[in-house]
Image (tube, grey):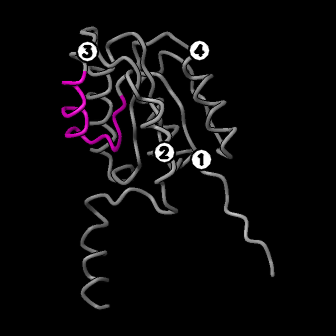
Amino acid sequence: MQEITRPAKRFIVSSVSSDAHMWNLVFLQLLLEENGGEVTNLGACVPDQVIIDECREVRPDVLVLSTVNGHGHLDGLRLIRKIRSEPDLQDLRVVIGGKLGVRGAENVEFIEKLAEGGFDGVFESEGALSSFDEFLRGIGPTRRLGPAARPALEMQEAVA
């Protein structure tokens, strides 16, 4: 029997535009690579447009945004709105995690707002790594089911 090898998942790892921390990105890159991922690490303080351009170039399975400066909820919401407004990126899986705000335990209030804004996963500091790992295990071979793909899927289900 011939062994089938699945291609590695492609990831872009980046901070949000106001976050100058790099250690978290290196950690994520190593974590993803150790699990067979192919990672493009854009680094710290990356402008929104650079992230968008790189997503078009690399076509990752997941864009992973990390923040530790406490402004992730602001920068992240602005960025996800831009990404979801781009027709060719609407189905891209995008997650954000880290220190989303500066309110400690109250940062959990940002999770729902970021998810409603278009993130596929939002991981606040406490317990974030195990939740992120669970998210990664659930990634299938296809991209996010964006609004443009839903009518086609509904048609396929109706025919079947």
Estimate how packed mark 3 is, as few (under 14), some (14 to 19) or many (20 or more) residues with alpha carbons within 10 Å: few
Q: Which residue is mark 2?
A: 62
66 relative position to 58: left or right: left
Callout in the foreground (1, 4): 4
Q: Are marks 3 and 4 in contact (CB under 8 Å)?
A: no
Q: Which residues are magenta?
A: 108-123
Coordinates of residue 75 in the picture (x, y in percent)? 31, 21
Q: Which residue is mark 4?
A: 23
Q: Give the mark nearest the N terminus, 3 or 4.
A: 4
Q: Which residue is mark 3?
A: 105
- SS state under label 3: helix
Q: Which residue is mark 1?
A: 10
Q: Are marks 2 and 4 in contact (CB under 8 Å)?
A: no
> Is most of the magenta stretch helix, strand or loop?
helix
25 relative position to 100: left or right: right
Residue 21 sits above or below residue 109 on the image: above
Callout in the foreground (3, 1): 3
Q: Is residue 104 magenta?
A: no
Q: Nearer the viewer, residue 2 or 8?
A: 2
Give residue 114's quadrant in the image: top left
Estimate how packed mark 4 is, as few (under 14), some (14 to 19) or many (20 or more) residues with alpha carbons within 10 Å: few
Coordinates of residue 69 in the picture (x, y in percent)? 39, 10
Quarter occupied by the C terminus: bottom left
Q: CA distance from mark 3 to mark 4?
A: 23 Å
Residue 147 sits above or below residue 117 on the image: below
Q: Give the mark nearest the N terminus, 3 or 1.
A: 1
Q: Amino acid at mark 4?
A: Trp
Q: Amino acid at mark 1?
A: Arg
Estimate how packed mark 1 is, as few (under 14), some (14 to 19) or many (20 or more) residues with alpha carbons within 10 Å: some
Q: Give the mark nearest the N terminus, 2 or 4.
A: 4
